[in-house]
Amino acid sequence: MTESTGSATRAATLKAAALAKIDEIAPNLIAISDWMYANPELGLQERGAVARLTAELERHGATVERGIAGLETAFRATFPNPVQEPVIAILAEYDALPEVGHGCGHNIIATSAIGAGIALGALGLDLPGSVVVLGCPAEESAVPDAGGKIPLVEHGYFDDVDAAIMIHPGTSDFSSMESSLVAYGLLFEFHGRPSHAAAAPHEGINALDAVIQTFNGISALRQQLRPDVRIHGIITHGGTAPNVIPAYTCARFRVRASDPVYAREVVDKVVRCAEAGALAAGARLEWRQYIKPYQNVIPNAGVADIIAANFAELGIAPTERNRSGSGSTDLGNVSHVVPCGQAIIRICDEDIPWHSREVADVTVTPVGHEAILRGARVLAMSAIDLLCSPEHLIAAHEEHERTAAPVRERLKQVAALA
């Protein structure tokens, strides 16, 4: 028997055991996901979800560190194994969207992740390496200081990780080789002077006018921007009463582009629009980044190919994708430091709008429940392949060095613009 044949046989045996464990714990995973659907929590407030996810991990022998990287709802779960290297990280997300709930299916992401982690932990000494489940709060940019993976990177939680993998619900089944948009979060506060809107409007400085002029300026700016740029904002405070000249207003914007240098240039243009709005209204502007930048995802073909092979092994053929466009994710920041792979798990058709209540509702149907298990299976099997075939990890790291190097150079240019 050749070494590669022996590795394949070993991997097949481990996969069979992991899949059996996932089937065994399936009712618990589904119950946790359904609870999360019924009790959605915004980023950095996911206390109930984290309590249930970590309790299930501990029930199956995991050691859990809570509150890591200075984040109350972040966690790190490991399983007993004297074989410390290599290390595969499985990433869990569990925050919801305001008013929508789990319209991005993070309840499925979280339960798939812990399901895979528990299945791999049950392999014990037979697993030729270590697995860590990292709980990553606040992926949605719905709250200030979102992007829980960024502090995890900054605090070194990926320093000893050889590859990171996760799943994400979608409208197709496939192993993603797509990048994402760099995303900045900007908060603009305008300070004016209150006055009676009917009796003495000339004595006031209308901070709402400054916000409206900012939106108008950005709308005009779009004509001079590249097609990949996305700018979208909301007014979080527009005044208190229609008969009072607003003395204070606030707006949040997300600024996105595919290239990190160009994204930073667009940020400067958007800030100038806000400055112009304040100047026109006679108001004073204060602004800051309310979220650290989400970087673009650096795809890794070595990890993606392993995920795709396990889709095929499970009999899941890639489904056709007609929906275009791209979003942003703090997985991008992780992909800048370690090879990353992401399996997209189909839960609905493309006619259902994403980030919607309709998507959330799908997560508690039989289709959503099956997606949890399908995601856990793909993650567990892919982790086993990475651990059983060191040559795949070496190739993934060599590829990462090649693809990340140009991005690092671009980020140096971004730093020079700041």
Image (tube, rainbow, N blue to C red):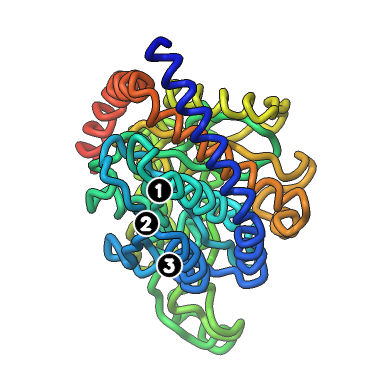
In the displayed orientation, state which residue is furthest to the front.
1
Crowd band around label 1 with a 10 angstrom C-alpha radius: few (<14), some (14–19), many (20+): many
Cα–Cα span, label 1 and label 2: 30 Å
Mark 1 or 3, nearer chain start: 3
Q: Is residue 33 left or right of residue 149?
A: right
The mark lying in front, picked from 1 and 3, is: 3
Residue ID for mark 3: 44
Mark 2 or 3, nearer chain start: 3
Cα–Cα span, label 2 and label 3: 18 Å
Nearer to us in this view, 204 or 290: 290
Q: Residue visible at 31% across and 26% down?
A: 404
Crowd band around label 3 with a 10 angstrom C-alpha radius: few (<14), some (14–19), many (20+): many
With respect to residue 85, does 385 lie above or below? above
- Secondary structure found at label 2: strand
Q: Residue visible at 31% across and 63% down?
A: 65
Q: Position of residue 132 (x, y in %)?
A: 36, 48
Q: Residue visible at 69% across and 58% down?
A: 360
- Secondary structure found at label 1: strand
Residue ID for mark 2: 77
Q: Position of residue 7 (x, y in %)?
A: 42, 21
Residue ID for mark 1: 184
Cα–Cα span, label 1 and label 3: 19 Å
Q: Is residue 393 left or right of residue 314?
A: left
